[in-house]
């Protein structure tokens, strides 16, 4: 799992999916949680959820909110706003828990694959 922190900018008020609540235009901090797809020869991730940090719903409550939504709904809302999501979703940082461990794990997998290939009479290509 990894979390990508980014900023989503809406130029107009927006909605998410079938939700009737209208959110104000503005810049919002977004955390997208992704899951690594295992068993591939390259790194690939599936977006699981997006957490949008919203201002307080009213001046009375005074508390900011965190809305959990489907990343696809966020992308659709950004597209409806007039600009494609990649241009409007600016990555700020990526957090990968246990990244060192996963690199070591991948190195072990690669070494086992090379060893198996050699045992089966295949020679690694330089």
Image (cartoon, rainbow, N blue to C red):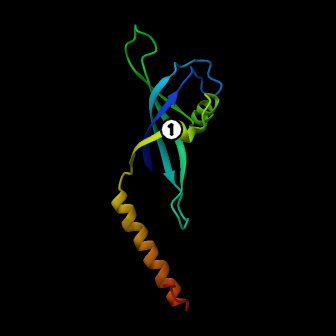
The residue closer to the viewer here, 30 or 106, is 30
- Image coords of residue 78 (percent x, y): 58, 32
Query: Residue visible at 53% across and 43% down?
Result: 48
The residue closer to the viewer here, 114 or 83, is 83
Q: Is residue 23 left or right of residue 104?
A: right
Q: Considering only vertical position in the picture, is 36 above or below 119?
A: above
Q: Residue furthest bottom?
A: 121
Query: Residue visible at 50% across and 83% down?
Result: 116
Q: Considering only vertical position in the picture, is 24 above or below 92?
A: above
Q: Is residue 78 left or right of residue 113?
A: right
Query: Residue visible at 45% across and 50% down?
Result: 1
Quarter-of-image position of residue 59: top left
- Image coords of residue 15 (percent x, y): 60, 23
Q: Residue furthest top?
A: 60
The residue closer to the viewer here, 19 or 77, is 77
- Image coords of residue 107 (percent x, y): 40, 71
- Image coords of residue 23 (percent x, y): 53, 19
Q: Is residue 5 left or right of residue 123?
A: left
Residue at image mark 1: 89
């Amino acid at each position: 799992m990894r979390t990508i922190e980014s900023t989503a900018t809406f130029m107009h008020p927006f909605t998410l999916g079938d939700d009737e609540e209208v959110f104000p235009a503005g810049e919002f901090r977004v955390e997208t949680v992704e899951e690594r797809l295992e068993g591939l020869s390259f790194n690939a991730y599936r977006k699981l959820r997006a957490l949008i940090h919203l201002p307080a719903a009213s001046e009375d409550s005074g508390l900011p909110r965190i809305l959990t939504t489907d990343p696809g709904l966020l992308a659709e809302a950004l597209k409806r706003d007039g600009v494609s999501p990649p241009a409007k979703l600016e990555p700020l940082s990526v957090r990968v828990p246990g990244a060192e461990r996963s690199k070591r794990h991948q190195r072990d997998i690669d070494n086992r694959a090379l060893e198996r290939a050699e045992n089966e009479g295949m020679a690694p290509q330089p």
